[in-house]
Amino acid sequence: MNKKGYFLIFALAILFLVFSINTSFATSETIYQSSDHQLDTYDKKIVTLKVDTLSYKLHETKQYLKIEVKKGYRNKYKIKSYKIKFSDKKAKLVKVNNKKYIKIKVPLYNSLSWIKINYLTKGKVKKESTSFKNSKFRVVKFFKGKKSNVKIIQEGITDYINGENFPTINYQKIKITAKNKKSKINQIKLLYRDYTTGEEGSKIFYGHGRNSLTTNLYGTYYGYGFDEVIVRYY
């Protein structure tokens, strides 16, 4: 074999070695949701009601109902009392001594059915009520991986149909940050399930070797959005 042949074999061997090293060092991880913070908003004329839900691993959940008199009505309106109904309890009347803001803890394994609010006021509106069905929501999901953390913000509406809540997401913001500056992001794959069809879907983004990536998604997603993230590194 002549020198050119040996040189060609040597060059191919070097290329194969470089490719093998790059492939061996390319890693990926699947990151699952660790917690989320959801805020459902119900807008009335005098007050704004917000259902604040914080969920952790092992399905631990804390939920509060926050009611606040709007700024334009605070001089004329105060909350005198309210009557509230939870899913597994009888309706209960509670006096609150004329407050502009109240916070109610939702009992464990219960959901909110309805509330009637009575005001101390000389204005025309003496009371308001709402059922906790259709709402605007904002969810912040947290994913903690070994090499990266992911934060997803989702906004949309919830429709109450045949006794169940069906969320429709119309905006999502995804931010991924590598914990180590040496970790370079190659590809991000976000997985979700469409509840209208039952089919799984995915979105893929490329990090181009960056240490962090932020992207916005506009469009309709029927379901609870992304619940699994696969990150590939260089």
Image (tube, rainbow, N blue to C red):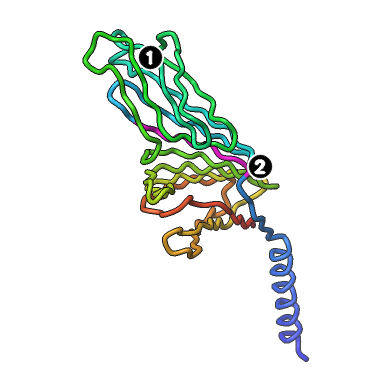
Which residue is tagged 2?
A: 57
* Magenta stretch holds residue 38: yes
Q: Which residues are magenta?
A: 34-42
- Residue 99 to residue 178: above or below: above
Quadrant position of residue 115: top left
Residue 39 lies in the magenta-colored region: yes
Relative to 120, does residue 209 appear above or below in the rendering?
below
Q: Quadrant of the C terminus?
A: bottom right
Earlier in the chain: of badge 2 and badge 1, it is 2
Which secondary structure lies at badge 1?
Answer: strand
Q: What residue is pinned by disc 1?
A: 79
Residue 33 at what x, y percent from top left?
Answer: 60, 47
**Label 2 environment density (alpha carbons within 10 Å; few <14, some 14–19, many ≥20):** few
Q: Residue furthest front?
A: 90
Q: Residue at x 56, y 45 (%)?
A: 176
**Quarter of the image where one finds residue 126:** top left
